[in-house]
Amino acid sequence: MNAIDNKWIGKRTIRPDGADKVTGRAGYSADHTMPGMIWGKVLRSPHPHAVIRGIDTAKAEALPGVKAVVTAKDIVDFPLDKSVMLGIQDMRWMCRNVMAREKALFHGHPVAAVAAISEEVAEAACKLIEVDYEVLPHVIEIEDAIKPDAPILHDFVRHEGKPSNIATTMVNKLGDVEAGFAQADLIVERSFTTRPVHQGYIEPHACTVSHAPDGRVTIWSSSQGQFMVRAMTSLLTGIPQSNIRAIPAEIGGGFGAKTIIYLEPVAVLLAKKSGRPVKMVMSRDEVFRATGPTSGSMSTVKIGVKNDGTIVAAQGTFYLQAGGLPGSPLRGPVGCSFSPYHIENVLSVGYDVVSNRSKVAAYRAPGAPLGAYATECVIDEIAEKLGMDKLELRLKNTARPGGKTVYGATFGAITFRETVEAIKHHPHYTAPLDKNPRKGVVRGRGVASGFWFNAGGESSAQLNITEDGNVNVTTGHPDVGGSRASIANVTAELLGIDHSRISVLIGDTSSIGFSNLTGGSRVTFASAMVVTQSAEKVIGQLKERAAKIWKIDPEAVIWDNGEARPAGPNAGQFPPLTLKELAAKANEMGGPIGAGVQLNTTGADPGFATHCVDVEVDVDLGIVRVLRYTAAQDVGRALHPDYVEGQIQGGVVQGIGWALSEEYLYNAKGQLDNASFLDYRMPVCSDVPFIEPIMLEIPNPKHPQGVRGVGEAPIVPPLAAIANAIHDALGKRFFSLPMSPPKVLAVIDAG
Amino acid sequence: MTDIRYLAPPTLDEAVRAFAAAQGAARILAGGTDLLVQMRNGMAKPGTIIDIKKIPELSSVTEAADGSFWVGAAVSGAVLAEHPRFGTVWPGVLEAINLIGSTQVQGRASPGGNLCHGSPAADSVPAMVAAGAVLTIAGPNGRRTLPVEAFPAGPGRTNLAAGEILVGFTLPPRPAGSGDAYLRMIPRTEMDIAVVGVGVSLTMAGGVVTAARVGLGAAAPTVLLVADAARALVGSRLDDAALDAAAAACSAACKPIDDKRGTIVYRTKVAAVLLKRAANIAADRAQGKA
Ligand SMILES: Cc1cc2nc3c(=O)[nH]c(=O)nc-3n(C[C@H](O)[C@H](O)[C@H](O)COP(=O)(O)OP(=O)(O)OC[C@H]3O[C@@H](n4cnc5c(N)ncnc54)[C@H](O)[C@@H]3O)c2cc1C
């Protein structure tokens, strides 16, 4: 299967959803409408922190055109004393995030929702809802939230026996760090901060929902998992899963943040109360204010080395912003920060800190980039102090097969070294850099590495042969990054037929078996696995049919190049039977041809990446521009290279934004001050150079095609790589992100 | 719920009458790239919209025999860029207008809308100030003219009287040896709002500056004409001392705020840096080097 003479795998075929997307025909979340449909709007808290003493909806309900009003009392309550988990989400927090219950915890927190005959009436009705707030002091930043006298968000949260905003602590340990540091010749310890950044998907959250009189619910929405939409909606509304059908719309980006829901259960309850289909669409302002960015952080990383560069001990302390409800991605920095390296003694500790911001949601390699930022900057400084080449220092310490990780796993085959070597020998890294190209401008080069766990998990597929001998493949995963294109390539390869004869579909929750989220870099890995097994079953059926027709043993039939052929003693005795011919005889030979496979997939080994970047700093304005970027990554097998490259390039671009320009800005009143793409500065096209991906195709032995997850590792190194490049340019280290012009200029001017 | 009346009068008189008749409930529409955004986010709820793009005087660019230019208030940046002569005579004004937004936005956005929106960060305004543009304004009481720098009254406010419409800009005849330039600082490369913007217009003879005007944006509640900076440049060969003095004058003129787009310290410093850079570009253009 990994042979280079593949006909379809590895080819840049046209993606099945491409024409619809470029011509505007593709149906996204907000595109669905229904007869009799009405509009839902959310009333949001104007206060960052307030007790909700009461909500009077009478005036809103009396407004002509209003059909239903919903508040927290309509949503299923998950009491605070008992955790109910759905995947990694605690429903206690989800129910309070979807609709504020006891308290409003951030500016923008939903407190009620209205459905009315138009958006305008619904909005007007929201204004008529009277909420009795008892405004409380608020706290936004981590350093303030962990002070002893900080306003406490949740009475039930205790840390070291006292009321606190530290909701949970995660400790990962390996060896004995004290003993390790005692052996060190050099120890570097630095503290860093990063700001919350939003995933910045183009498509705002939206849904259309119908609640039929017989109690059956249909949901049209885009998400990173229609089964998650169904399960969460079921839990939050009390409607059994069998009565909910979640139909995945095309998705305009998620990057992790659409692994939870905001609107669907509210819309279902509005639809149930009103008896009308309900549509809800967030504005960009709502997306910024009330949907999850990733955590901001405060971290300290300490690394000890011998004079020869051997790392003997590492310690990381990571405080992450959870937002108003617990749930920071502690596992990211705690588990990933040191994992590219073989280190005998590691102590990695994470704290989940609540404060009056919107609840965080997953964002590509959740938490790993902010951890790698700290670690990889410290490694850079160590290399500088030891006078060692930065890549040599990494090569000296690469994690080993059989090595134990701080997060508990034992490594199998490891491909980190290959990523470092790829950069080391790349013409980018070996090219000389003119550090002073002209007056007022300096340039620098930086490198950094990164690690991500990757994931397997549940996947389902169904592969059916149509009566005319073509193929329909259905999987249960929304296609965020080109997964249909990869599945089409795999199917064409396995069946030996032309790519154009295959149609790849995404099933809804009632038409395909359970499939877990499109996230964790798992979809191509997991769905290629179940599609492969389905295709193998179908090929088995085809061989049986041919055997029946030829009246020979099925074992004596081979499937080759899209047709059944007699083999062994029977070779050449009968003319081959094509897929079309077999399909035409399907019914007389035993019925329709098709097979499905449902699996909890395993074997998704971790991903590694090493990046190299050149930057240019305008020393009078403090502007940093990225001139050249090369990203090496072990991608296993690129089933469709375009979408592997796309993942790498996209991850890097998001990392550039995180490093240089993106941040949430709050005013003194605890309100988000930059809830638009104008002032929340994601990079635009002209801000970034061509990102050169180096795809290292080292097949994952645990996957039929050798696939390894690729979506998350590429966002892990850029923060540190860029910080290290700026240091190379200016001779100054930066310890907080974003490295925005005023900050950079202040450091330059400080001399 | 609210109905909006849309008018597109073919003459200025009709526009002025309709605007006066609406008694404050109407808004003028040029390209709409500010107005429609305000309407969408609920900041503007006009009962009547008066589209001025059908009025020839407001939609034309003409060069008079004396070399002066008329730029109608509603001319889009893209149309101005297509004019065969405007960009050669006023490259700084043109580059300022066409820094606005993206290609799509430039197809609509006008210098009149940019000025009337009243943003201290409006990109075309410092360049117009440096160019010495004079405005023609029409209202219920007839026409008047006003130097462009006297037009802004504060963030989001202008010195247009009730019922008045901006008709257009007159840019003065250009002596030989003249050049202008506009630079802005934005954290991104495009689609951003100026943290500071500086427009410089120079006339030079034998390497010596004989006339100068400097406009400064996003550094005070309104766009400013910085006369001290211009004075520092006139008579010089743009040597370091003159540029330093002009830069210092620009910094001194700054009365910025600390906000999400920039700090006081940063803006004050950047004003000086941009003045020097813009002056050098204007000088190169004045001397035919660029
Ligand atoms: C995506 C995007 C990017 C942008 N980028 C920039 C940028 O980089 N730099 C920048 O400066 N601006 C930018 N803007 C703002 C805007 O595009 C400019 O201010 C533009 O010049 C406005 O011109 P307009 O013709 O579209 O104005 P309109 O929206 O039509 O009008 C603006 C205001 O002026 C009033 N008005 C218009 N014409 C007249 C008149 N003749 N008499 C009286 N009142 C009048 C209108 O009633 C309204 O209040 C951007 C806007 C968008 C949407």
Image (cartoon, rainbow, N blue to C red):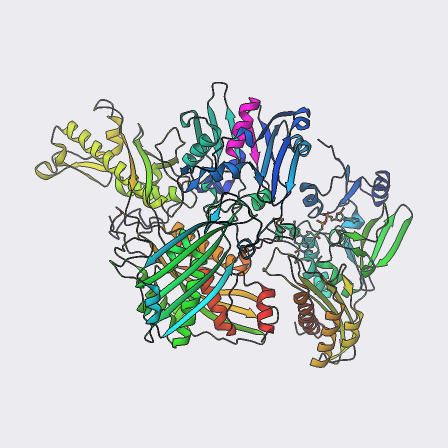
Q: Is residue A187 above or below residue B166?
A: below
Q: Is residue A385 above or below residue A348?
A: below
Q: Which residues are magenta?
A: A263-282
In the image shown, does A740 or A500 lie closer to the viewer?
A740
Q: Is residue A484 magenta?
A: no
Q: Is residue A527 above or below residue B248?
A: above
Q: Position of residue A111 (x, y in %)?
A: 59, 36
The residue under the point 45% across, 52% down is A160
Position of the C terminus of chain B by quadrant: bottom right
Q: Is residue A454 found left or right of A108 in the rendered image?
A: left
In the image shown, does A628 or A530 lie closer to the viewer?
A530
Displayed quadrant of residue B283? bottom right
Q: Is residue A279 magenta?
A: yes
Residue furthest to the front: A161
Answer whether residue B46 is visible to the viewer in this image: yes
Q: Is residue A644 found left or right of B31 in the rendered image?
A: left
The residue under the point 60% across, 69% down is A746
Q: Is residue B36 found left or right of A238 in the rendered image?
A: right
Residue furthest to the top: A214
Q: Position of residue A469 (x, y in %)?
A: 29, 31
Q: Is residue A247 found left or right of A560 in the rendered image?
A: right
Q: Position of residue A195 (x, y in %)?
A: 53, 56
